[in-house]
Amino acid sequence: MAIGDLLKRHFVDTRPLSVPAYRRIWTGQAVSHVGVGVTVVAVGQQVYELTHSSFYVGLLGMANLIPLVVFGLWGGAIADAVDRRKLLIAGSFVAWAATLFILVQAMLGLDDVWLIFLAVAFNSTGFAITGPTRGAIIPRILDAELVPAANALNSLVYSMGAVVGPMIGAVAMTGGGFASAYALDAVLFTANLYAALRLPALPPLGEVTRPGLRSVIDGLSFIARSPVLLMSFVVDIIAMVLAMPRALFPELTAERFGGSELALGWMTSAMGIGPVAGALFSGWVGRVKRQGVALSIIIAVWGLDR
């Protein structure tokens, strides 16, 4: 088999990037998720410096989780009933406003850990709306055969941001403190806004029902009746709340590396290297027939690594 054919079979499928609308969304995510990685490392360090407690750093996971669960389901219901472009823009502005909020608290030196938790929850609300909305947009702008490849490319974006962002964030904190890191995130996030604004109108298709609590309940019922979705949902929650060592990194840095922000950045970035490698060699994903079995195997391997 020629090298070119081998790469096409096993390397990440880049065909979705030939579609201009998707390419803009992907590029906007790639840039903005670097900023997300910057804030992740900065906000954990700021909370630790205020509290000297890894427990409080760990609570940042809960501040992220609750809005993701509540507004993620609601956002998915809304995305089926309104213009998805408008909803993506609205959610993006919410997330951006939260980034500006956490920037202002750092500039003013308010030193209030609960205010930081509020800002993180506010930011998570924006992402809870944009995440399912962006997922609902992809099948509207791509052919069905390209959707698995697009999902793999999205995974690559998240992972790249998780590697590059904390490193850049560590440098920003070393040179200008927390405010400089949050300011960098705010600037980089504008790439996401630009991509959303350039999308065509995406009105709902078919019969439209008024979104509300009933839609959220129906969504939960559907998840409960779908073992693969339910397992994915539960595992993601467990991973976010119980299985991430990131909450210990600021304290570990203080005790072992003299509080070096650069060491903190390297440790945080290391968690994303494996996912980047997995996403780069994801060309085979679209050829998997039994996605549920594949997911179970991957989760088992991930669990052994914990």
Image: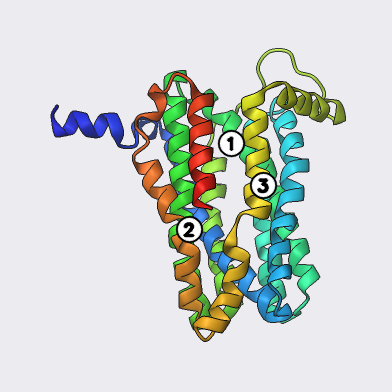
Label pair 1/3, CB-CB below 8 angstroms: no
Where does the image place residue 153, in percent across and percent down from the top left?
43, 39
| Tag in front: 2 or 3 | 3
Q: Earlier in the sequence, mark 2 or mark 3?
A: 3
Q: Closest to the observer: 196 or 63?
A: 63
In percent of the image, x 73 and y 78: which residue is there? 51
Which residue matches tag 3?
A: 238
How dense is the environment of label 3, judged by Cα within 10 Å: few (below 14), some, or many (20 and up)?
few
Visible residue check, residue 89: no
In percent of the image, x 72 and y 69: which residue is there? 55
Q: CA distance from mark 2 to mark 3?
A: 17 Å
Where does the image place residue 276, in percent across and percent down from the top left?
40, 49
Q: Is residue 133 left or right of residue 220?
A: left
Which residue matches tag 1?
A: 134
Q: Earlier in the sequence, mark 1 or mark 3?
A: 1
**Please, which residue is most extreme toward the left here?**
2
